[in-house]
Image: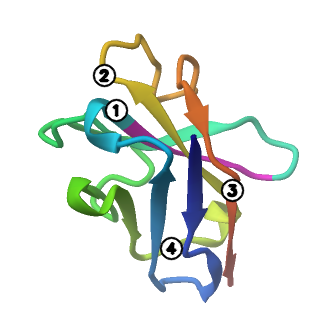
């Protein structure tokens, strides 16, 4: 069972990146997926989540209108499109999965069953 986040990199402020979260060893069909980020010296924070059926999403207030989460269950992958990036959003971004019957908290990541290794996003000013 593995989640792999990718797509991070260095981008200028105002730029865009698309992160991908690919699953191996299990199917994402029955899992909610969340994106979280952690900057040095800061606590982990929830960025966005999408439920297993894809018809319900959550966004942190700070990213609403700029980030879009989506899923392609046929590709066993969830995406996070990030537009108008800001320097303060520099962080390691992680994806995590929670079984659809799990009680999880998208703002903190508590209750997520599986975590992937993160991908670094650096936004230069």
| Disc with the residue nearer the chain's start (3 vs 1) | 1
Mark linked to residue 100: 2
Q: What element carries label 2?
A: loop
| Disc with the residue nearer the chain's start (3 vs 2) | 2
- Within the magenta stretch, is there residue 30? no
> Which residue, given by chain and number where applicable, does mark 4 sit on?
85
Task: Tell me what residue is drawn at x 59 percent, y 46 percent.
Answer: 2
| Disc with the residue nearer the chain's start (2 vs 4) | 4
Task: For label 3, count other residues whose C-alpha is less than 10 Å away and answer few (under 14), some (14-19) or many (20+).
Answer: many
Mark linked to residue 31: 1
Mark 2 near mark 1, Cβ–Cβ under 8 Å?
yes
Task: Tell me what residue is drawn at x 50 percent, y 73 percent.
Answer: 85
Q: Is mark 1 on a helix, strand or loop?
A: strand
Q: Is mark 4 on a helix, strand or loop?
A: loop
> Which residue, given by chain and number where applicable, does mark 3 sit on?
118
Please indicate, yes or no, whether residue 60 appears anywhere in the rendered image: no
Depth check, front residue: 22 or 68: 22
Disc 3 or disc 4, which is closer to the eye? Answer: 3
What secondary structure is the stretch in magenta mostly built from? strand
| Image position of 60 (left or right of 10) | left
Magenta residue span: 33-39
Residue reaching furthest to the left: 55
| Image position of 109 (left or right of 29) | right
In the rendered image, residue 62, in percent from the top left (x then y), is placed at 45, 49
Task: Tell me what residue is drawn at x 58 percent, y 19 percent.
Answer: 110
In the rendered image, residue 41, in percent from the top left (x then y), is placed at 87, 44
């Amino acid at each position: 069972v593995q989640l792999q986040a990718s797509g991070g990199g260095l981008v200028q402020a105002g730029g865009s990146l698309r992160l991908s979260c690919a699953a191996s060893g299990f199917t994402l069909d029955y899992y909610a997926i969340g994106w979280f980020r952690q900057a040095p010296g800061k606590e982990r924070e929830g960025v966005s989540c999408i439920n297993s059926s894809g018809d319900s999403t959550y966004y942190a207030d700070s990213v609403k209108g700029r980030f879009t989460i989506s899923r392609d269950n046929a590709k066993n992958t969830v995406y996070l499109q990030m537009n108008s990036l800001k320097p303060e959003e520099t962080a390691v971004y992680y994806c995590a999965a929670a079984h659809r019957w799990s009680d999880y908290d998208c703002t903190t990541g508590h209750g997520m069953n599986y975590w992937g290794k993160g991908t670094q996003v650096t936004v230069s000013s």
